[in-house]
Image (spheres, rainbow, N blue to C red):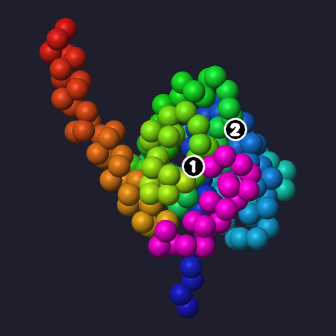
Amino acid sequence: IQTKKKIVIGWSGSHSTSKYLRLIKKTLIKLQKNYDFEFLVIGDEQFKINNLKCKSIAWSQENEIKNLQKIDIGIYPLPNEKWVQGKSGLKAIQYMSLGIPTVATAIGANFRVIENGVSGILVHSEQEWYNAIESYILNPELRKKHGLNARKRAIELYSVKANKDFYLKIINNL
């Protein structure tokens, strides 16, 4: 009997930023009532939201890539705060480099990192969060297409190879 792998919606970060997941708490609970998926939190093993089935695991350098590769849909919720304006979008870049389509708050560096509707989905509201995640749950081809586009973008813009000349120029000018 062939069984479908359960979709994993995931987030990676630290206990200091896991609080941002609460921004989309209602959306995640509503999605879980309508769809059977695993919600994976990497980096805050104590993380819990009432009424949301969640697997929370510790971050480790040895298992970081292996754990990230379990994720089918990466999420990156952020509040509209000054601190967020200075963030680099690293979480999105991590997901993208592994070919994981990402749903992220349309704020700050995320506009630079993610091409909306091409290498991920940028959202503003709870309804947009719901619609974006649902579209990835229901459409594996869209997940695959955005994931491939995301990986290509991450390699072209953020890899060591893509940036080596820039860094070598700085080092050589010291």
Residue at 61%, 34% (x, y): give it.
14
Task: Work out whether residue 102 or residue 64 is closer to the camera in this orientation and state it.
Answer: 102
> Would residue 100 be seen by someone viewing this image from the given angle?
no
Tell me the magenta residue range: 122-142
Position of 152 with respect to 18 (left or right) is left
Residue at 46%, 46% (x, y): give it.
114
Which residue in the structure is indicated by mark 1?
Answer: 122
Task: Work out whether residue 123 or residue 13 is closer to the camera in this orientation and state it.
Answer: 123
Q: What residue type is labelled 2?
A: Tyr
Residue at 55%, 73% (x, y): give it.
139
Work out which quarter of the rendered image holds the N terminus and state it.
bottom right
Q: What residue type is labelled 1?
A: Leu
Label annotation for residue 20: 2
Q: Where is residue 15 in the image (x, y as percent from the top left)?
A: 66, 33
Position of 107 relative to 173 (above/below): below
Query: Which of the two marks, 2 or 1, is nearer to us in this view?
Result: 1
Which quadrant of the figure has residue 149?
bottom left
Q: Position of residue 127 (x, y in %)?
A: 73, 56
**CA gap, disc 2 to disc 1?**
16 Å
Position of 13 with respect to 172 (left or right) is right
